[in-house]
């Protein structure tokens, strides 16, 4: 935890939030500085580079720490991304609220103005969305996944993630899964020439007489109406380039607004969402291609739109191996003991029959609701039972069932009795436990099996057929993990399951490698699900920064209650305070995104210091304000960025720079959760400091007050 002196005379909760958030500052952006976490009991250490792993390792005993942890966990459990943004904005906005309190801004005004400012940004930032459509239309003609050469961009604040990993795919064709049951997409060290994958992304509309409609705003009401007189010195120069049509559509006049073309390529979308982690996104993109190829061979699949099913992706971690062993292949890859290698060699190259057991496969297991007490044992008076008789009888009965239906493979969702595993191995039957639910369902569909809770329920209709057991690689006997286990591959014709094998020579990095893989996978999943993405590289945050400055300069005059828009039926005191403090609160809220962009630029080494980054951001901010339309300015800058010619560095030929994308809903939700947490701690702190007695009012005095 970052060292910071807590001033007890100020709001301690806000100070604690800022202190906690400072610990995750290095996790922001595509270039992450890992942290070592050492277990005090086992003295084992791991490298982490995610907010979730950091907060799990910290001792968060305080109430504020628990609230922060629950907020981050809620974001992670729902979207699996956006937690670093959430943590940083919590700290930045906590400091902003502290500054507002130091200036004497009333707490209701802080909460109201910040909430409305964030809501306005969330609605206006729609203009930076890029539609995602027809991603898989050109997949039939795509057989190779070629290398993306490194690029770097120094334009601020629209940051581009550095690329130091090549995107390569082995030459393979998955149109016939039966002919190639073991297709593998992997990382390779060979270099191939990069074709022109990226089409021009931004087109500039040159006709000055044609206006571009950006969005239909729900805020286009009386509080947003502006005068048609745009050249009068009595009106704000920067805010009067918009007029309201009767239908509420905002039109921009003056400078031409560039149009953003949609994203219609899976490779382009994957590169834009990789945020510098090309090795992980390479595997995710390959998994999506495998799922698409598997879905195309299903009958009637060409009439049904393909959906990226992230629940059918499984990871298998093999520490100690070189990173070039990382790959993606159809089927289920799992680890078994080396003692089963002989059995696997005998079972491979022939279809086996399989039984699927949901729950545990142990003698004392009972289905949920039928578990008997562990310390209760039934003893018969006429027969004396030995200690191991019951388990031995049960194991023999299981073997009789497996022998009766000629079953050589048993997949169990829960735990498996070690005694049974050994007995089955001796009879040339392989039992594998801890199989994920999605894998069980995939084998049930592909092999025609039915999951059962107990071995006594097995019948001919429950047994699956056509499952193949083989080594993951031809030299799998040499590939073992730290626990002396080897990797095997289970596959079946038409199985809709993909396994990503993650390897690293450094054992401490495996957790980080797996976390980064799932982060990239969920980015692609949410983008395909929502069919839209944001322009990334800091463009969205910069838009919010400039938009809040525009709102601050257009602050309503004192007494103009209708323009406030969110504090209805308020007292005259609160309305006057709102008019006085609104610009200040909005600018402090904007400072949170200013700090965000500054930290992003420093972490990616685009700026050598925070002062240099702040100066660069301020220059772009002034240019955006002078242009009259921040969104148009951002799109123009992206147009220049995309049409600019840079040296690829390897081939020596000029290449276009691909766009960077952000997912929409998880990003906006991270903003909302961050501000909600800050305002909750603010309200709690105020009640602790002032006491309830100072806030109790008579019924006559309560009229006109807004309590949060």
Image (cartoon, helix red, strand yellow):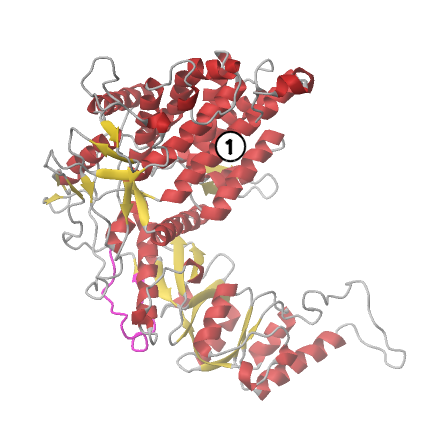
Locate the C terminus and report the quarter of the image it occupies: top right
**Residue 285 visible, this orientation:** yes
Tell me: residue 318, above or below residue 3.
below
Q: Name, please, the residue furthest toward the front.
A: 246
On whether residue 476 falls in the magenta region, the answer is no
The residue carrying mark 1 is 676
Q: Position of residue 22 (x, y in %)?
A: 46, 27
How many numbered marks appear?
A: 1
The chief SS type of the magenta part is loop
30 relative to 445, above or below: above
- Report the residue at 83% width, 72% height from top: 378
Q: From the viewer's perspective, tell me whether residue 67 is left or right of residue 438.
A: right
User: Which span is picked out in magenta?
Assistant: 168-185
**219 to 584, vertically: above or below:** below
Mark 1, Cα crowd under 10 Å, few <14 / some 14-19 / many 20+, is some
Based on the displayed image, in which of its 4 quarters is residue 631 positioned?
A: top left
Residue 598 visible (yes or no):
no
In the image, is 345 to the left or to the right of 424?
Answer: left
* Residue at the limit of the structure toward the bottom, as seen here: 404
Q: Nearer the viewer, residue 39 or 309?
A: 309
* SS at circle 1: helix
Q: Nearer the viewer, residue 657 or 39?
A: 657
Residue 230 is situated, as x and y percent measured from the top left of the image, at 20, 21
In this view of the protein, which residue sits in the foreground, 25 or 120?
120
Residue 582 drawn at (x, y percent): 42, 18
Q: Position of residue 62 (x, y in %)?
A: 62, 30
Residue 174 covered by magenta stretch: yes
Considering only vertical position in the picture, is 55 above or below 568? Answer: below
């Amino acid at each position: 935890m970052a060292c910071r002196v807590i001033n007890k005379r100020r709001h301690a909760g806000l100070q604690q939030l800022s202190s906690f958030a400072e610990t995750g500052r290095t996790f922001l952006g595509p270039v992450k500085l890992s942290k070592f976490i050492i277990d005090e009991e086992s003295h084992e250490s791991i490298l982490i580079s995610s907010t979730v792993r950091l907060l799990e390792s910290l001792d968060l005993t305080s109430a504020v720490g628990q609230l922060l942890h629950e907020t981050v966990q809620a974001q992670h459990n729902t979207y699996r991304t956006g937690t670093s943004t959430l943590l940083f904005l919590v700290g930045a906005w906590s400091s902003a609220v502290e500054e507002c309190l130091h200036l004497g801004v009333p707490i209701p005004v802080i909460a109201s103005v910040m909430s409305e400012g964030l809501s306005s940004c969330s609605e206006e930032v729609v203009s930076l969305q890029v539609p995602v459509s027809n991603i898989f239309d050109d997949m039939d003609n795509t057989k190779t996944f070629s290398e993306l050469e490194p690029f770097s961009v120094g334009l601020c604040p629209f940051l581009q993630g550095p690329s130091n990993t090549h995107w390569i795919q082995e030459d393979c064709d998955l149109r016939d899964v039966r002919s190639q049951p073991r297709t593998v997409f992997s990382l390779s060290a060979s270099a191939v020439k990069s074709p022109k994958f990226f089409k021009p992304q931004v087109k500039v509309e040159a006709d000055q007489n044609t206006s571009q409609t950006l969005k239909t705003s729900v805020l286009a009401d009386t509080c947003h109406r502006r005068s048609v007189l745009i050249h009068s010195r009595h009106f704000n120069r920067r805010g009067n380039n918009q007029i309201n049509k009767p239908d509420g559509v905002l039109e921009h006049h003056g400078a031409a607004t560039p149009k953003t073309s949609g994203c219609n390529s899976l490779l382009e979308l994957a590169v834009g969402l990789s945020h510098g982690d090309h090795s992980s996104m390479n595997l995710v993109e390959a998994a999506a291609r495998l799922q698409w190829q598997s879905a195309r061979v299903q009958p009637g699949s060409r009439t049904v739109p393909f959906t990226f099913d992230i629940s059918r992706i499984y990871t298998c971690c093999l520490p100690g191996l070189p990173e070039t062993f990382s790959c993606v292949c159809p089927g289920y890859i799992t680890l078994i003991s080396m003692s089963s290698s002989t059995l696997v060699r005998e079972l491979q190259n022939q279809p086996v029959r399989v039984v699927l057991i949901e729950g545990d496969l142990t003698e004392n297991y009972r289905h949920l609701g039928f578990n008997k007490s562990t310390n209760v044992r039934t003893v018969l008076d006429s027969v004396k039972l030995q200690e191991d008789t019951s388990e031995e009888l049960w194991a023999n009965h299981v073997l009789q069932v497996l022998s009766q239906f000629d079953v050589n493979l048993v997949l169990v969702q829960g735990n498996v009795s070690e005694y049974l595993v050994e007995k089955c191995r001796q009879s040339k039957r392989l039992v594998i436990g801890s199989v994920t639910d999605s894998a069980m369902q995939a084998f049930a569909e592909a092999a025609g099996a039915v999951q059962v809770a107990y071995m006594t329920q097995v019948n001919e209709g429950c047994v699956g057929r056509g499952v193949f057991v083989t080594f993951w690689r031809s030299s799998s006997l040499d590939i073992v993990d730290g626990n002396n286990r080897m990797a095997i591959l289970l596959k079946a014709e038409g199985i809709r399951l993909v396994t990503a094998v993650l390897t690293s020579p450094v054992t401490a990095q495996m957790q980080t490698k797996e976390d980064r893989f799932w982060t990239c996978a969920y980015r692609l999943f949410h983008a395909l699900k929502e069919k839209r993405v944001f322009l990334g590289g800091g463009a969205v945050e910069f838009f919010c920064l400039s938009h809040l400055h525009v709102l601050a300069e257009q602050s309503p005059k004192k007494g103009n209650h209708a323009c406030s828009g969110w504090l209805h039926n308020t007292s005259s005191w609160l309305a006057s305070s709102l008019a006085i403090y609104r610009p200040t609160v909005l600018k402090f809220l904007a400072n949170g995104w200013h700090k965000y962009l500054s930290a992003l630029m420093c972490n990616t080494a685009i700026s050598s210091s925070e002062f240099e980054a702040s100066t660069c951001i301020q220059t772009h901010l002034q240019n955006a304000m002078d242009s009259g339309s921040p969104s148009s300015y951002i799109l123009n800058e992206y147009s220049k960025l995309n049409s600019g010619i840079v040296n690829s560095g390897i081939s020596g030929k000029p290449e276009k720079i691909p766009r960077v994308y952000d997912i929409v809903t998880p990003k906006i939700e991270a903003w909302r959760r961050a501000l909600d947490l800050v305002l909750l701690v603010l309200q709690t702190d105020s009640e602790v400091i002032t006491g309830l007695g100072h806030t109790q009012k008579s019924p006559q005095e309560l009229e006109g007050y807004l309590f949060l």
